[in-house]
Amino acid sequence: MKNVIIFGTGEFAKNIYNQYKNDLNIINFSDNNKDKHNTLFFEKLVVAPKDLISMDFDEIIIASSYSEEIYQQLVEDLNLDKNKIRRLYVNESKVQFYSKEKVEKSEYFMFEICKLLEENHISYYIDHGTLLGIIRDEALIPWDKDIDFAVLIEDKEKIETMLKSYLNNFIHPLCKTNNWKYKIEKEEIIVEGIKETLFIELQIFNDSIFKEDEVALDLMFRYKRDSIIYWGVCGKYLKAPINICFPTSQIVYKNHSINVPNDKIAYLSNLYGDWQKPIKNWTYDKYNNL
């Protein structure tokens, strides 16, 4: 059995670990986030990339949406053997996350959160891969790992207060168990040449022992500055003109009204470029900087 190190500690890495843990001897994880070094992930030590130079392994699997950048880092900066490095992409068949059943569970939860935000007068719009799939394909993208919303950072405390009472009582009719929780992620991002610590997202998830009940939804925080909004995604700084985002507009998806950016076509074009053409090996470094 191969001795393998997984590069990445996010949701993608979690899914890769669960897919391969019975076929490979996963000895460590690695990550560029210094805060994760010398911590445990699935009871495996997370090591700094520089430590890989002196380690004995058969293969490194890159489980990150920044796979191209990490590959260059490992091969060019650390001089590791490129034949021992494997890149995986979120849309490969081995790592497809959504079955038909999971799509139904995710869409139900998406519609419930849309309704909850509207009832509490909190501005939002469907975002990123979720928006792309709904507009381009009239469906969730099969390899997308969660549902994405955009919300304003100024509503953060209001959202937390709302969720504390809501999630304790929420029962998803399609899930075997309901153990709904949330956590908030923040990260250092270079914003116009200056390092800022941004709240990235509030992740809502069902902490269930059943894999098919692993429904997740991200409320991604947006910051305002002058005529733009900006945010962070996996260490990357993105921005957009406020007027293509707000005020939001509505579309009907599967008989439900949902909020989308004010000019959804301009938004998708700026975010993805040629958004109408699916990219086989898409990674976060392919985002346009809005």
Image (tube, rainbow, N blue to C red):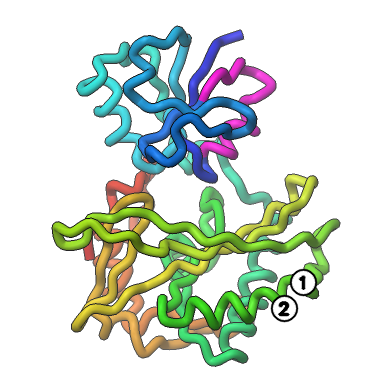
Badge number at residue 165 = 2
Observer-nearest residue: 87 or 36?
Answer: 36
- As drawn, 164 above or below 8: below
Observer-nearest residue: 185 or 118?
Answer: 185
Tell me the kind of residue under disc 2: Ser
Q: Quadrant of residue 281?
A: top left
Badge number at residue 238 = none
Question: What residue sits 68% from the left and 74% below the top?
Answer: 164
Asked if disc 1 and disc 2 are in contact, CB closer than 8 Å, the reply is yes
Indicate the position of residue 31 as horizontal and vertical percent values: 41, 34
Query: Residue farthest to the right?
Result: 176
Observer-nearest residue: 122 or 244?
Answer: 122
The region drawn magenta spans 13-28
Q: Quadrant of residue 32?
A: top left
Question: What residue sits 48% from the left and 43% below the top?
Answer: 91
Q: Secondary structure at mark 1?
A: helix
Asked if residue 147 can be seen in this view, the reply is: no
Observer-nearest residue: 8 or 46?
Answer: 46
Label 1 sits on residue: 168
